[in-house]
Image: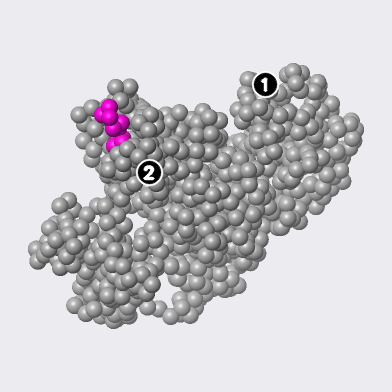
Amino acid sequence: MDSRVNIEKNKGNPSTLQTIRFWHTHGIPRLGIPAIKVSDGPNGVRGNHFFMSTPAKCLPSSTGMGATWDTELIETVGLKLLAEEAKLRAASIILAPTCNIQRSFESFAEDPLLSGLIATAYVKGIQSGGIGTTIKHFTGNDKEDDRMGSDSIISDRALREIYLMPFMLAQKHAKPWSFMTAYNRVNGTHVSENPFFLKQILRDEWKFTGMTMSDWFGVYSVDLSIKAGLDLEMPGTNKWRTLDLMTRSIGSRKLTLRTIKERARAVLELVQRCAKECPEILDGDGEERTVDTDETRDLLRRVAAESIVLLKNDSNALPLDPKKVKKVAIVGGNAKAIVVSGGGSAALKTSYFITPYDGIVNALGDVEVTYSEGARTFRSLPTLDYELVTENGERGWVGEWFSHQDDESMTPLAAPLSSRIIDETRLFISTSAPSGITRRWTMKLRGFLKPRDTDCDFQFGLEVAGRARLYVDGNLIIDNWNRQRRGDGFFGSATVEETGVYHLKAATKHEILVEFCNVRGPADGDEDEVVMDSNPGVRLGGAVVVEADVLMDEAVKAAKDADVVIAVVGINADWETESYDRKTLALPGRTDELVTKVAAVNPNTIVVTQAGSSITLPWADKVPAIVHAWYLGNATGDAIADVLFGKHNPSGKLSLTFPKAEEDLPSFGHFHSENGKVRYAEDLYVGYKHYLHRKIEPAFAFGHGLSYTTFEFSGLSISKPVFSEHDVEISVSLDVKNTGAVKGSETVQVYMSLPKTSELTHPPLQLRGFAKVRALEAGKTQKVNIKLDKYAVSYWDDKINFWVVEKGDYAVKLLKAEARSICTFKKLKTSGKENVENPIASISCGITPKACPMTPSHVEKVPISMKKGYEDSVHLGIEDNPEGFWIWVEMAEIKTKAEQDIV
């Protein structure tokens, strides 16, 4: 290794600090240093290409994986699905997981402990399979609008206790091979140029020894990022770290060879580790492959079902019994739509996909089913992937690539350079243009729209990163070429969707032609005709023109005539994607009206919602049952059907709070980037902590999720603390009994409140541990142990910059998550000798506070031997009540000298 770091004695080795391709590190064959391939996650492994990518397995969105609250399952998924998918894509590193707290569908949870422990399991599973992970986006990357320039203004306590915590936990327990920096600034400095994060926190405090890389195009300098500790710039196109600029930086003494060698060593060590852990990738042919087996399909279906959250189930409306219904109406814009995942880097082409409609119909068997869209939910007109055929009848259309007369010419040559069948109408070409084509090029896409049964008007939509025209039967329908309007698709490079209507004749095959060039057209305020060299793309969508009132009336009639209605509604990757933020939490179009009207004519209306993050549900009290299905990947329809019909007993718990109104959000009023600054004014009160602090009742609380069975907690106990050199461990144990009639799984959630006597502000309750009881048979009991560490009782003291444990009373709530809101309490006297005032439930729990049966005899003073430097005993009080358990602990004040060092 030393000899390779010291190559090119006079110049160092700057080439290892950047790449020459989009998805590979820079290989040096003469030195035996291979190029390492990376691939996007987190819900699958796409491979090298956005355009015509290799069909792959798609998992639930990260918020869905977080909703399992099952670290064992996620570790299994990492090993058996994700690591194996990486090998099939010939990728040594997966660019995942995402650990940002508020990054929509890409993140695991709004709580740092849940996010950190799910991320830990994800990393452990993948890396145990010989594949590296790149945990991202380090840190404060919670917005998409203005993401490269915005400055996240975060307090020291919120930074440590909320936003850095998931990364710290993953590093402590799983040790990712690499970290990816965020695009944004934090408190004034871009993270990719910030030694506070890359050196002081990551390497000095957390003892990280792996490699750091930038997000794609997330480097903004040569010398600053290298000196700050950023090892690798990605990708290899349009980069700062060119040989010329690196050499000039060395010559001007902005950089030293020593610093460059430090960065190069980290890159080479990662390359070496990839070669050792999974040599078959580097020794293989580099081809990407698709392999589906019964085992992987079963696991995809299982994790999808485990992600689903039963939000509401009044009068046991679910599960449905197909034998007891004669007619089912399926309504909603998402029922037949292909809603696989969120958009952006997480998007991929699935090897197979089951729509909610198909999954439900397959489970119903011979039951009569009617369908109506009811209300349209798309942001852009639906793609025509399954609506176009070639002249020979194959699915898709034929794409021909044309070089231009020269690199700067806008005139294409007469003969195509290459052609192929393309089975998608959203083409994000990225850097996948044919080898040898000119810098400016043209692509012509020809196919035929499948014949319609009746005459109809058909609306087409054309969106482009470049310029394009649409012709139908030789007629120009959309001109998105000569003058454009800037939009936000294709990672912010596209136009808005321009539309046009064409009248289709029944039983007629209409010819479709799109002419596309990778050079932007002029637009108001942006006249530059820029070459899209890394982000060219074109998207063709379309749908039959139907009056909105007609769709609504059809759905209401279908609902009125059915025994049961299943409404499948939500959003999709057009609404929820990387590169721009959602503008509202409301469901699109007239969706809320649809659910309200359908429920009014049929009280047996079951609603299935699809969204990767929080949505508002103003009709929640009007329907008996609501199932939240996130984005579930390949097995979407089967998993939804498994829950609706009782094949799978739901056990998912919300990883995010669902508010009643947007005005209730913690970040309401300060979400936007204002003059380049994003103020995290909610501070410590992120997610459920805000709702508890402000006494705001959410629609459905973080941690909430129902089951088809019931559970009882008993036998609570707490262990003596076990001390190690750098930590402390306390075990909370209890018995969980399945008191219902069917097998089910339950999550025990441990929340803690810090002393009320503190001079500092603390959230009223914070998640400090959890455990999943899996597949517990009816009538059976299982012992559960939940381990708490030093962070369960500590906070970040921004005056002395240490983790601190205060003297005082610590209240703990064990929650069964059967209520719509986390329970709150008035007050706990925690000397270990007094009665406890009655804990009360918030109104939304629907639990009437009962007189507390606590008497002095119920309170135990438990002496515990403490390590030197602690008080002689810890006082514990335990209350057993039907709603859960309270534990309160009086502890001594402890101050830590460093983040990993309890004295």
The correct choice, above or below, for 454 with respect to 708 in the image is below
The residue singled out by tag 2 in the image is 222
| Closer-to-camera residue (903/409) | 409
Comparing 279 with 605, the one in front is 279
Which one is earlier in the sequence, the residue at label 2 or at label 1? 2
Residue shown at the point (60%, 72%) measured from the top left: 600
For numbered disc 1, what is the local secondary structure? Answer: strand
In the image, what residue occupies the spot 55% across and 57% down? 677
> Of residues 15 and 616, which is closer to you in this image?
15
Q: Position of residue 33 (x, y in %)?
A: 26, 29
Direction from residue 632 to residue 900 in the image, left or right: right
Q: Tell which residue pokes out farthest to the front in this image.
A: 252
Residue type at tag 2: Val
Residue 780 found in image quarter: top right
Q: Secondary structure at mark 2?
A: loop
Q: Residue 309: x, y in percent?
A: 56, 51
For the record, the magenta segment spans: 8-17
Which secondary structure dominates the residues rendered in magenta?
loop
Residue picked out by circle 1: 723
Can I make out residue 406 in this image? Answer: yes
Q: How many residues crowd around disc 2 within 10 Å: few (fewer than 14), some, or many (20 or more)?
A: some
